[in-house]
Amino acid sequence: MPVAADPLRPPLPREIQLEVTGACNLSCRMCLVRYRPKLGRTEGRMDPARFRALLDGLPGLERVTLQGLGEPLLVPDLEEMVAAASARGVRVGFNTNATLLTAARMTALADAGLDWLHVSVDGARPDTYAWVRDGADLRRVGRNVRAAVGALRGRERRPRLSLVTVAMRRNVAEVPDVVRLAAHWGVGRLWVQGLSHEFADAPGSRPFREIRAFAQDQVLPAGDPVAHRAFARARRRAARLGVELRLPRLEDRPPAPRRADEPGCDWPWRSAYVTHTGGVQPCCMVMGEERVRLGDASDFSGVWDGPAYREFRRRLMGDDPPEVCRSCAAYRGRF
């Protein structure tokens, strides 16, 4: 975490996450996009001028993630965004559902300077995957990923590819087989995470009621024996196949005494999330500006140093965190 004279007023972040689009071609069950009216490509797109202004306003930026609730490959000028960040010496990447990924698009993104690409694969069986990622086909995604891997073969500089799985009750037993898919597709890394939030604090509107009900039904309970067995098998298989594997904790992090200057989560000191409409939020774990909006990105530095951000940080340094943090998997040490 950056050191600052005033712990509530850190230097501008060196990393940021930008929701370059709120539009998506899928309706994934753990995403707020499923429970809201769909956005079109044009209305869901981040204004390119806003994107450039954010880069210009953060001269110390080292890493940018072009990712939010939408699918980045829907953005027609995504390669230009990657190139703009890369030209500044900023490491850049994003998550994708890979349904729109082609060898040509992979080559163009690599040429633009992409540093990493994470592909979401939430199940090893086509029916499980399609249940989670409503509107997608696992076989097609596999073909697309293998084509992308092939397009990068032999390049001196190429982005690092990873698979990402959101583990939940419905799919956790298949995690070892996702390891096998990663190896079969030529991807050397699998990042497994839990559901990001239980939405206990969320507004009572229909979209949040529905996603809260889903999360409560599918979140992995602490010490879940099925998950423990699946993770143990996944570790053994990853070691045998040479796949780098990251697994989440299955228990909440036990509370530990903190120094007076040590927050329960350091995200609001080191990074920020900007929605496609310009709303500034403390992190990517927050879905929906109705829950937390700290200001408008048109004055990002003013928001970063403003009273709303300072109050958010102050509460994270004590034992009364903001409501949105209380059931967050990252805050609880389980993500």
Image (cartoon, grey):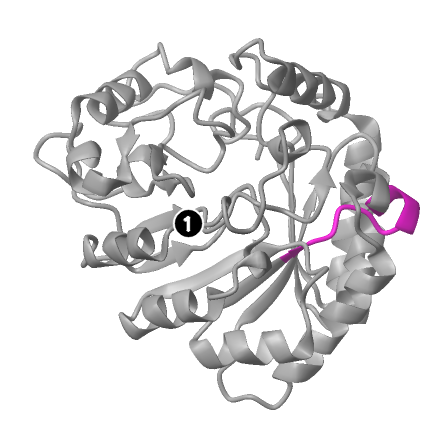
Q: Residue at the location (60% across, 75% down)?
A: 106
Q: Which residues are magenta?
A: 119-129
Residue type at the position of mark 1: Met
Q: Is residue 263 visible?
A: yes
Q: Is residue 47 left or right of residue 200?
A: left
Number of residue marks: 1
Which residue in the structure is indicated by mark 1?
Answer: 46
For the N terminus, which image quadrant? top left
The residue that appears at 63% across and 47% down in the rendered structure is 24
How far from the left and from the top, in percent, is residue 207?
A: 63, 20
Q: Is residue 103 left or right of residue 45?
A: right
- Find residue 152 and report its horizontal and vertical position in percent: 62, 82
Asked if residue 225 lies left or right of residue 10, the reply is right
* Residue depicted at x 79% and y 42%: 134
Element at badge 1? Answer: loop
Outermost residue to the left: 5
Which residue shows up at 85% across the image and 51% down it? 124
Indicate the position of residue 254 as horizontal and vertical percent values.
51, 21
Vertical position of residue 110 compared to residue 269: above or below: below
Q: Looking at this view, is 183 or 151 the one in front?
A: 151
**Residue 255, relative to residue 146: is it above or below?**
above
Q: Give coordinates of residue 259: x percent, y percent.
A: 26, 23
Residue 67 highlighted magenta (yes or no): no
Q: Quadrant of the C terminus?
A: top right
